[in-house]
Amino acid sequence: MFETTTYDGDRTKQYEMLNKQLDALLTGETNQIANLANASALLGQFLDRTNWVGFYLTDSEQNELVLGPFQGLPACVRIPFGRGVCGTAAQDQVTQLVMDVHAFPGHIACDAATNSEIVVPLIKDGKTIGVLDIDSPELRRFDETDQAGLEAFSEILLRHI
């Protein structure tokens, strides 16, 4: 059984601890689905004030994202590249830090309770293989500290999938 450890310090140090835990959790396992499932569970335990944490994986034949492992309520299954926050992150290969999803053009509302979102593209060999998507019922829940910590989290994850 893997136990998470919290760090009672600044948020940057908390993300550093989280990322060390992710690396330890995934070391030795090569199955992509298992590693994505454990990564979403770890984030679900670490992040507060969120209502959805998970992954969408690229279906390159359809040029869209398909629902992958997650923690939260049932979600949209397919998202075309370029649509919504996830599709924009996948297409542009740039993290989307959205303070108010209702102000984001073309936002896809899978959960009406969501008010802010961060989506980190997962890029391997120059191609988007998926995205890490995290939603919150709070406006302005995520900031640059979250972005930096989650981008580092994604880099570690990419080494294990």
Image (spheres, rainbow, N blue to C red):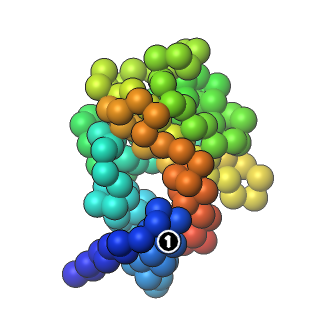
Q: Position of residue 157 (x, y in %)?
A: 53, 66
* Mark 1: few/some/many CA within 10 Å (<14, 14-19, 20+): some
Look at the numbered disc 1 and give the secondary structure of its residue.
Answer: helix
Residue at the spot of label 1: 13
Amino acid found under the numbered disc labelled 1: Lys
| The C terminus, quarter of image | bottom right
Seen from the viewer's position, the closer of residues 84 and 138 is 138
The answer to whether 82 appears left or right of 53 in the picture is right
Q: Position of residue 158 (x, y in %)?
A: 59, 64
Q: Is residue 78 above or below residue 108?
A: below
Whether residue 89 is visible: yes
The answer to whether 55 appears left or right of 60 in the picture is left
Q: Report the residue at 35% width, 55% height from top.
A: 47
Whether residue 59 is visible: no
Q: Report the residue at 69% width, 58% height from top.
A: 124
The answer to whether 60 appears left or right of 32 in the picture is right
Q: Report the residue at 54% width, 45% height from top.
A: 143
The answer to whether 127 appears left or right of 48 in the picture is right
Instruction: Tell me which corner region of the image, top left, top right, bottom left or bottom right, holds residue 83.
Output: top right
Farthest residue, direction front: 9
Q: Is residue 33 above or below residue 108?
A: below
